[in-house]
Image: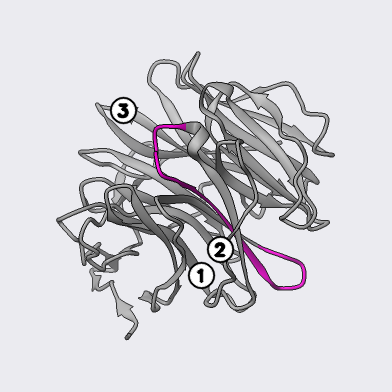
């Protein structure tokens, strides 16, 4: 299969093309680093849901999300809404049902960006795919896994030896927390993957993963009414008993090597705000501290990354004007 070029240049801006009007498309955008405060990343007339955020060594912030209506991707600061410097559709193929959802972004040691997302084949049937993205060109997509039922919430980490682990959740009923199970698969090249191994039974959805400087894995688990839980593993197979961190939902987990801390951001339905807890050992956690005050609206899904100044960047979904858009805030810690 040939690589797919999905961008073209018009007056120094790139516009989104290759939309599939039959379903939901994953969008990935490249924006310059926010300097502080809150920046509006999208201006949509319908709803979006956040996929992942990643800041590369060149100071570019990559944000992926699922656009539920195939609209152009937008970026703005607090005063002016501007067209994004670059925007592409990262899943232009038509797979019939085509209920695609963005998951995660990772840059390998060669500087190649890798995009992970789930592709709907039919109702309650999804597969996890990965593809490269270099200089405006999407590489061939590769199927990572398909367990019977819905496969989503994939997250990708790179180990100190250069190998990769990808975690995802699978369920035959997206509405039942007890039906979700966590799986892990491994790769040396991001193309060929091992047969997925089930690593959880009754925990709920494995929503996000991170890796600390000692190669320990941390899983963030969303178990509906039981809130968010944390589990740790040294090998990705044997996991500690999950501890409950918060009654919130829609969280993300991130390890900052520069700060030596593990951060969890999450949505608190009691006040519609985004809160963060942090730890240096994965055992003793700070009291929750407010990251995004959106009591007047509703900030829900969120993602964390870090800029080159050691500031946390929290991207979140907020309902402003009747639609869910993406915003970002930088926080000095």
| Magenta span | 158-176
Q: Which residue is mark 3?
A: 320
Q: Is residue 68 above or below residue 245?
A: below
Residue 315 seen in the current view = no
Residue drawn at x 15%, y 55% is 22
Q: Which part of the image, by quadrant, shows the N terminus?
A: bottom left
Dot 2 falls on a residue whose secondary structure is strand
Can residue 26 be found in the magenta stretch?
A: no
Residue 105, numbered circle? none
Q: What distance separates the C-alpha of mark 3 from that of mark 1?
A: 31 Å
Badge 2 or badge 1: first in the primary sequence: 2
Dot 3 falls on a residue whose secondary structure is strand
Identify which residue, 272 or 162, lies in the foreground.
162
Circles 2 and 1 in contact, beta carbons < 8 Å: yes
Q: What distance separates the C-alpha of mark 2 from that of mark 1?
A: 6 Å
Q: Quadrant of residue 228?
A: top right
Badge 3 or badge 1: first in the primary sequence: 1
Circles 3 and 1 in contact, beta carbons < 8 Å: no
Q: Residues within 10 Å of mark 3 (few under 14, many from 20)?
A: some
Identify which residue, 78 or 68, lies in the foreground.
68
How far across and down, in percent of the image, does residue 215 sit? 79, 58
How far across and down, in percent of the image, does residue 43 sit? 28, 42
Q: Residues within 10 Å of mark 1 (few under 14, many from 20)?
A: some
Q: Which residue is mark 1?
A: 113
Q: Which residue is mark 2?
A: 106
Residue 297 seen in the current view = yes
Dot 1 falls on a residue whose secondary structure is strand
Residue drawn at x 34%, y 82% is 3
Q: What distance separates the C-alpha of mark 3 from that of mark 2?
A: 29 Å
How far across and down, in percent of the image, does residue 260 sit? 81, 46
Q: Is residue 131 above or below residue 22?
A: below
């Amino acid at each position: 299969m040939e690589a797919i070029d999905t961008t073209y240049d018009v007056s120094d801006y790139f516009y989104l093309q290759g939309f599939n009007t039959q379903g939901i498309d994953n969008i990935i955008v490249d924006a310059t680093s926010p300097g502080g405060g809150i920046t509006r990343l999208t201006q949509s007339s319908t709803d979006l849901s956040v996929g992942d955020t990643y800041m590369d060594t060149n100071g570019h912030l990559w944000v992926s999300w699922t656009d539920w209506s195939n609209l152009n991707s937008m970026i703005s600061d607090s005063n002016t809404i501007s067209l994004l410097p670059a925007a592409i559709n990262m899943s232009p193929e038509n797979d019939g049902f085509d209920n695609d959802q963005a998951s995660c972004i990772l840059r390998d040691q060669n500087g190649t960006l890798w995009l992970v997302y789930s592709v709907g084949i039919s109702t309650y049937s999804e597969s996890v795919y990965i593809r490269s993205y270099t200089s405006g060109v999407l590489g061939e997509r590769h199927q990572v896994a398909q367990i019977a039922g819905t496969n989503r919430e994939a997250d990708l980490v790179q180990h100190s030896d250069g190998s990769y682990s990808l975690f995802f959740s699978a369920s035959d009923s997206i509405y039942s927390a007890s039906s979700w199970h966590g799986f892990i698969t491994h790769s040396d090249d991001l193309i060929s993957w091992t047969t997925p191994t089930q690593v959880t039974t009754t925990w709920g959805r494995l929503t996000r993963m991170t890796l600390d400087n000692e190669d320990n894995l941390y899983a963030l688990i969303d178990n509906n009414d039981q809130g968010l839980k944390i589990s740790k593993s040294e090998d990705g197979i044997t996991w500690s008993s999950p501890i409950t961190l918060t009654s919130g939902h829609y969280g993300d987990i991130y390890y900052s090597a520069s700060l030596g801390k593990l951060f969890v951001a999450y949505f608190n339905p009691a006040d519609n705000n985004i809160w963060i807890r942090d730890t240096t050992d994965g055992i003793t956690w700070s009291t929750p501290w407010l990251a995004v005050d959106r009591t007047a609206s509703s900030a829900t899904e969120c993602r964390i990354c870090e800029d080159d100044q050691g500031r946390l960047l929290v991207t979140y979904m907020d309902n402003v004007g009747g639609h869910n858009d993406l915003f970002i805030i930088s926080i000095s810690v």
